[in-house]
Amino acid sequence: MDRAQPSPPVEKRVDGAVSNPELEREIKQLGGELHGSFPSALRHPVRAVDARAMEMASSDRELRAALFRFVDVVPACRSLDDVARHLTDFLDEVPEAPPPLEAAMRIAHTKAGRAALGAAAARGVRHIAHRFIVGETPRAALSVLSQLWNRGIASSVDLLGEATVTAAEADRYAHRCAAALAELAAAVRGWPERPMLERDATGTLPRANLSVKVSALTPLLRADAPALGKQDAARRLRPLLVGAREQRAHIHIDMESLDSREAVLDLVLELLSEPEFAEGPSAGVVLQAYLRDSPQQLEQILAWTRAHTRTPPLQVRLVKGAYWDHELVQARQQGWPAPVFEVKAECDRNFETLTRRLLEARPAVRVAVASHNLRSVSHAIAYNRLLGAPDTELELQVLRGLGDELQDALAQHGFRVRTYCPVGDLVAGMAYLVRRLLENTSNEAFISEQARNTPLETLLAAP
Amino acid sequence: MTVLNRSPSTPARLAPFSNEPVLELRRAAVRARLEDALTALDRGLPLEVPVMVGDDARAGAGSRFDSTDPGDPERVVARAAQAHEGEVAAAVATAGEGFRRWSRKSAGDRALALTRAAGWMRDHRLELAALEVRECAKPWPEADADVCEAIDFLEYYARGAVALEAGRELIQVPGERNELRYAPRGVTAVVSPWNFPLAIPCGMAAASLATGNAVVLKPAEQSPACALRLVEALRAGGVPAETISLLPGTGEVGAALVKDPGVHTIAFTGSMQVGLEIVRAAAEPHRGQHHLKRVVAELGGKNCVLVDADADLDEAVPEIVSSAFVYAGQKCSAAARVLVHEAILEPLLERLAGAVRVLVVGQAADLETVVPPVIERAAKERVDRYRELAGRTGRLVAAAEPVPEGGWFCPPTLATDLPPDSPVLAEEIFGPLLTVEPIGDIEEGCEIIERLPYALTGGLFARDPATVRFVSSRTPVGNLYVNRGTTGAKVGRQPFGGNKLSGTGSKAGGPDYLLQFVEPRAVTENTMRHGIVVH
Ligand SMILES: Cc1cc2nc3c(=O)[nH]c(=O)nc-3n(C[C@H](O)[C@H](O)[C@H](O)COP(=O)(O)OP(=O)(O)OC[C@H]3O[C@@H](n4cnc5c(N)ncnc54)[C@H](O)[C@@H]3O)c2cc1C
């Protein structure tokens, strides 16, 4: 692939956005190429069915709510009869259920009908879940992970679990993480070499990669007393960092809702400042571009990297953010100013600004751009090239089930792509699953736009 | 229909009501301001709380009493004068005078004074919260929420009274004009508790004042300084001194006050026992008393949370724990009994136990604290008694122990396996003790709730919409909370108050509340003269 020369800094538009014709040209070009390698729905019959179900769900708000509440409760149902009863009770609340669902309601009038309906519905939920969740245990997930690797795709494993409300649950999660690290580290040794996935200018990139949630590491995470949860989680995160260093694995600390941000970021940066961790493990944090104060957060992180040169450098995963509705609803209920952007384009613009800032801050940080938005991703690649950096110096990340097509296209074009792979059973995975379903069917999401056959030009336009 | 605005000088239209936002304590910069506020408060302790009868603020002719920090009983927060009988009578007489002038003002003018009082509280917000931290051991988030609720009551009732002044639509036919208007009742005796030391007295006083009544306030003896600040706020806002008097003191002051024939309305929030005494006392008309006293009472609760088999325990466990243990369970809305579907008894009990063990017991001033000390020695002894009984006749599953020394700390405790007739399951404990019982199904749970004398709040964790409908039509509680905690009612959003022996069914912070403080008057005028309709 040819590469653009370093170019003069981009210019600010009046609205704060940036315009640079060269960058835009490159984005259009790249986006077009990537898009060109997306499979058509025809070649994916199962996807096509899913897509139709998703479309049905996104077109009717009430139906969408009913179906998601149903999916959410399935693991808590005690029998197929119970499953069917919940389904019909939820659908009862939808003023105009579409004909296929009316039919479902009718068969639920008999016990046998309910058993059949319950079985079908439970199967349906499991089917959807498998699209987003790679396996029940890390061991079960290994075959999927190695298949991905063979196709030139790296992964990060996320252990799904129930919320942590007790110390025992926090210990159990920490234990599962440690076990998963060991299992992954052992398994990846047998994988074939994939230079694009294993090396950048600053050094090696671990094959084994685990994403960890601080809220699962302590029952004491509290928004108004961040130090408490931070100290408690540190006890359990420290051994994981030691384990990761010894086994040459990467640990990535996910970011959750704003209520826990201070605790999470302080925890990670404080632990990584300890001399013990100056030379490993490879570790990373998440920056959420939907937060209005994310630019200040980034500066805080960059200031830290200047004060603590460590090898390997801290990886920053840039995302838009998974808790948008939660943040907005909470702020409305409390009467606080919204911490997130409320206009999608502002969020997307901020994402691009942060992308540039991050790419320019290398080599003090490693950059991972995590998005399913072809525009956001193309922008990152294009800007990286504009800076004259090789493609190896940028990592792209997607979520399993949400970014499969983009993942394949990126791998095919020789980019380093990492897929976030949740592992766990259905009960534990439900919160995750429902969030992904909501994301998949939300009107403003790029992937829904794409599914609606919005013209490529519009999809790739500057936000 | 003519608008019954007696004064044309109604102030500029009030903006629509919205709840006062609580502090965003998740922001470090906001948290940083709290310590300064507390230091500033501590420098001025102890505060002097006088008897305030109209303009006259006296140190009290007789005895005095102290309020102390429940987390450090050596620390005196306020030295208060104990009002004596003569002062009670004088306060009611002064209020009678005040009533004459105050009731003649338009609702708009009165609203102006109340919203200015709200502004004063906003300006003194951290100082007020700090005082609650010290005087009542309210942890910061709770103290702050209490100040916000007080502000909300002022703003909400001010607007409500303006709307009420316009009267209600009646049927009109040719030749007659019908009007329904609401007049204030007279003097309100406000007798308030310490657990929401600003919000509850403020709500009862604000509703009275907004509708044109005068108020004599008898606050709990545990929180006289908070009450003093309330009176200061109201007066700073422009409520005349003769319209709001303060009588600090113990129970006998309240008893004398409610018996006074010059009192028309008694607004009380507190225990069922005292509430029933007040109802009895109010029923007895004195010689020369030409009115029936009305009692507005908010009494106790024994609040149950139903957990169905399909509940999401990830959500239910933290919500139940905070409903039961935040502020050491000292809220009338606090959860006391969990009634859980037997299919999930074991996992729920295990997770609740684990969540109770990690509760942070500590000083109210410490942001990490969830469970502060209880209010006083007698409260601690009461809670300890119930806890001992629960251990002896049932099983203590978990507790957060040991607790700090010095203050009135009680270990938050989870108990189960109690006999069905145990007092632990029937009586209001008002402390950090939560019990768990299995039920065969939700209907059985509803029957248990129905048999209780109380009907204040209730909780339900269930995901089937049919179950939610069933429980909401079936339970008599004043406030049912579905898939969330049972505390933290917001003005204008969750009108709050109980039924049965939990209260008179008045709903604080709701659209009907003001009606308790007014008497309706209908005026019908014949507008026909010599066969001609003149209006
Ligand atoms: C590998 C990976 C790891 C991730 N880890 C995390 C993590 O740790 N923490 C986390 O919070 N998120 C994380 N995410 C991000 C999150 O889960 C979503 O996938 C992401 O926000 C979707 O954005 P997009 O760019 O793919 O799609 P787009 O469709 O371009 O953007 C959708 C996003 O825009 C935002 N949005 C939606 N509506 C509006 C609006 N009206 N105004 C402003 N903004 C709006 C929301 O954030 C929404 O998710 C991760 C994503 C990936 C791929």
Image (cartoon, coloured by chain):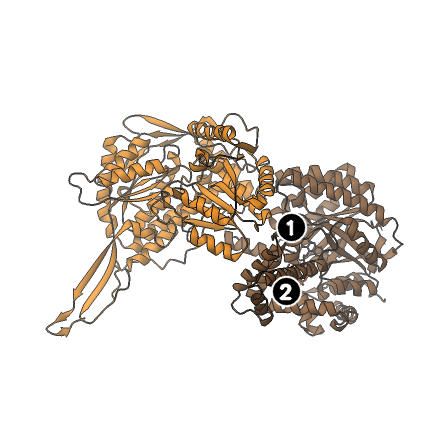
Whether labels 1 and 2 share one chain: yes
- Ligand 1 shows up in the quarter that is bottom right
A220 relative position to B244: left or right: right
Asked whether residue B103 is in view, the answer is yes
Q: Amino acid at mark 2?
A: Thr
Residue labelled with disc 1: A256
Q: Colour of chain A?
A: brown
CB within 8 Å, label 1 to label 2: no
Secondary structure state at the residue bearing disc 1: loop
The answer to which of A326 and B307 lies nearer the viewer is B307
Query: Which chain identifier belongs to the orange chain?
Result: B
Q: Mark 1 vs mark 2: which is more N-terminal?
A: 1
Locate the C terminus of chain A and report the quarter of the image it occupies.
Answer: bottom right
Q: Residues within 10 Å of mark 2 (few under 14, many from 20)?
A: many
The x, y position of residue A292, in whole percent, is: 61, 55
**Distance from mark 1 CB to nearest ligand 1 atom below 8 Å:** yes
Residue A135 against residue A235 in the figure, above or below: below
* Disc on res. A441: 2
**What chain does mark 1 sit on?**
A
Secondary structure state at the residue bearing disc 2: helix
